[in-house]
Image (spheres, rainbow, N blue to C red):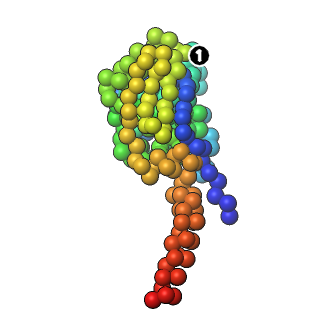
Amino acid sequence: MKIMQKQKLTKIISTAIPLRMENVDTDQIIPARFLKATTREGFGLNIFRDWRYDPDGNPKPHFVLNHPQYAGEILLAGHNFGCGSSREHAAWALSDYGFKAVVSSFFADIFKNNALNNSLLPVQVTPDFLQLLFAAVHENHKTKIVIDVDKQTISVPSKKISEAFDINPYKKICIMNGYDDVDYLLSLKPEIEEFEKKRKNDYSLS
């Protein structure tokens, strides 16, 4: 059976949505009452539901995702993003909404791993650089941010600012190629077959 690949992320060039809030937990990203689905699709509809809508389902105009000027594939978030419960649905919801990357000065470890496993890039930057990003986007909502996964850099060309970020080497390979763990093993099939062939030849000569 053919394994469906996740999206490949090599370089993201996009405007950003600035969520200048700290300690955003997974229940705020996707409230527990919306976790009834058995597939990953559709969670984006209820992302930040209690912040985006009032009890009658009307959009709250002050919430940043409801501001018409802000859009993009990058979410700028405050410190300690993705804390709380370990639900993988938080990464599903962010990805389903259309985000390809979340930028913060700190991520909860479980959320960070869940994001990487679902082709959502968590980019951890220094607190000072995060403030520069927020300032640039607030000054001009059309500001483009460039995230280069291969070079492991995040930059704002118009402001001539840039910073490096860390990523697990194995997860980097997976996210750049759209692999899950099974896809990665399948990608090594030629090397494995060559190794087995050589091992058999060496054994037959011994």
* Quarter of the figure with residue 78: top left
State the residue in front, 12 or 66: 12
Q: Residue at x 50, y 12 (%)?
A: 140
Q: Position of residue 52 (x, y in %)?
A: 52, 25
* Quarter of the figure with residue 11: top right
Secondary structure at badge 1 equals: loop
When the figure is inspected, residue 195 is found, relative to residue 55, above or below; the finding is below
State the residue in front, 161 or 89: 161
Q: Residue at x 48, y 38 (%)?
A: 149
| Quarter of the image where the C terminus is located | bottom left
Q: In the rendered image, which residue does mark 1 sit on?
A: 68
State the residue in front, 115 or 123: 123
Q: Is residue 22 left or right of residue 189?
A: left
Q: Position of residue 104 (x, y in %)?
A: 39, 31
Q: Position of residue 107 (x, y in %)?
A: 37, 38
Farthest residue toward the front? 205
Q: Residue at x 50, y 24 (%)?
A: 145
